[in-house]
Amino acid sequence: MFSYRKPDSCGHPDSPGRPAARGGRGVVVALLCAALTAVAVPAARAAAPGPAAGQEARQAARFWTAERMAAARPLDARRQARTAPSSAAAAAARPKGTLFQGTRLVGTFFGSDGPRGTTWHCTGSVVDTRARNIVLTAAHCARSMTGDYIFVPKFVKGAAPDRQPYGIFHIKRIFIDPRYVPDPGSSTTKKAASDLDTAFARVSANQWGTSLQDAVGGGLTFTRPAGYTHRGVTVVGYPSHRHNSAGRAVKCTVPTSQLRGYRQLSMTCGGYYGGVSGSPWITDYKDDARTGHVIGNLGGYNGGGNDADVDYISYATAFGADAANLLARAVADQAPPADLPPYRGLGGSLPGGAGRWRKAAFTASGEYTGDRHGDLLVVWSDGGVTLYPGDGKGGFGAEKRLRPANSTWTHARAVTGGTFTGRRAGLLVRWSDGEVTLYPQPGPFGLGREIRMAAPGSAWKNAAQFTTGAFRDDGGTGLLVRWADGGLSLYPQVGTGGLGAGTRLLPANGTWTKAALLTGGDFGGTAAGDLLVRWTDGALDTYAGTSAAGPGTKSRVRGPNSLWKQARVLTAGAFRHDGPADDLVVCWSDGEVTLYADTGTKALGTEYTLVHPGT
């Protein structure tokens, strides 16, 4: 037996990011090496262990004899023997899983937790990370791992720990999204939170002192799928011995579809009895491969099956930002935050689906309701204007309609919010004819009075974009304007009396004509005015400390890329009160809306989905 390690130049996905391209909004394309060079090294069990490496596994190996593992009862007892009524013809035509010897990247769990005795419990898989010790499973499985548990890759029934192909690995820490809460009296849930039925575990070295990925020779690449319909996804799991006396793994390659109303995948294939929860759903599976792309895990609604608990209907969470954030926490060995934005399922934290949000023409952040929470104001392509009150935690309340669809607001060409008068935010609009108007105090009951700031036909017709920020020397609100010729100007005295005199920061130039989107905010946590720019090639830059002296210090956040070319509308604001910096809200071309909490001058913040794609 040999252990295989990827060359260092390949790297590992430390913190899963957004996809490199958006077909239907979302495949994370892992940057794999064009060619891998296999290096044969001594077998994992022959490696000389350090003084402490593998100590937990060696201790567990003294308890987990072959007999104890063989006698362990299934803790995941759902979907054991029930079958829904169906015709013989339908049953015969249904795909059926194949029992086989297993594959190195998939295994099962065993636990000893007092009153329940020894248990054979669920399925797990190895995920490729820089930590090299991460196992994927289902949250409803991990919640039950309250005692002393081990993970056994490519489990062989009847073999003692030292005879298992890669040894055993002791579970050190479990990571579960705190918003995954089972229904009363159940270990699972059928509510929207079932979309979060994913967990990760950190494991110790095996009894020979070898890390998990070094022992099995690789890991699956965490991948966010593009939609729910896939031609051939392979699901590998370990059914309990009640239906699997030989203790083998089951595999089935089938097409998938969406579980209606949920951010979950669905498949039809028989043989998936209790024990398969947590099984990886792999898009490019090969027997005993050292890699592959995993897009979800068996779980979700009702623990991963329909209400009848039949063996041939299975569901899986479809990985998104929530699972990516959870994996990043597991890799960093940090507990998930307890104050995550509320999870509302496919609807997200913003009312309306992706079809609605594809029509968002402009967004403007500000404190519009008087409760000191950051709110989001939206101008739609049909001229409607709505307000979404923020809750201070990154979530938003019910829509407040300020203007119904109308032809007037379809002529808005630039929109921004800012504290131009007093504490409450106002709204500044540049119209197609060059007129500029200020709404000093829009709120949940309407836009309020309108003040003309520039007359129709004015030079402001050439104001391509504008945004506000703490750009004044005294930290007050200034208006930064990008003109059609690429020039930049700062207006520090905007108020009910007019726009005031402007200061030219940059003359006409070709570079800034390529600024596709811009927004001001406090990205450095210094209360200074910072500027974020999305360029036409998809690159993102920040300019820290933008003021009358110039655009500020430039930092590259993202290089040119196809992903951010799909960002259509963005704004920054204090939507969460617990962070040092402002949050960035982005509306994508497919209608997805995401929030990057505490975005910095050199990196985007933690991503949360406010509106899911395909809704």
Image (cartoon, rainbow, N blue to C red):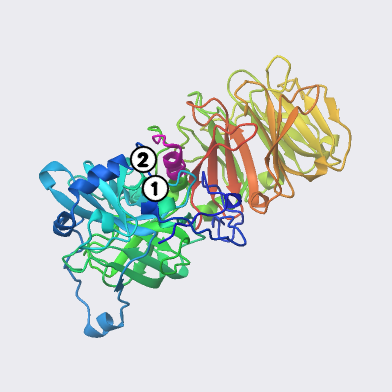
- In the image, the segment drawn in magenta is 325-336
Is residue 520 covered in magenta?
no
Nearer to the camera, 490 or 356: 490
Q: Residue 56, how many percent across, how many down?
A: 28, 41
Which residue, given by chain and number where applicable, does mark 1 sit on? 210
Callout 1, which amino acid?
A: Thr
Mark 1 lies on a secondary structure that is loop
Residue at 45% from the left image edge and 58% from the top image edge: 295
Q: Residue 530, how many percent across, how many down?
A: 68, 28
Q: Earlier in the sequence, mark 1 or mark 2?
A: 2
Residue that extends furthest to the top in the rendered view of this protein:
474
Residue that extends furthest to the bottom in the rendered view of this protein:
89
Determine whether label 1 and label 2 are within 8 Å by CB.
yes
Chief SS of the magenta region = helix
Which residue, given by chain and number where applicable, does mark 2 sit on? 53
Q: Is residue 527 above or below residue 228?
A: above
Q: Is residue 106 above or below residue 204?
A: below
Q: Quadrant of the N terminus?
A: bottom left
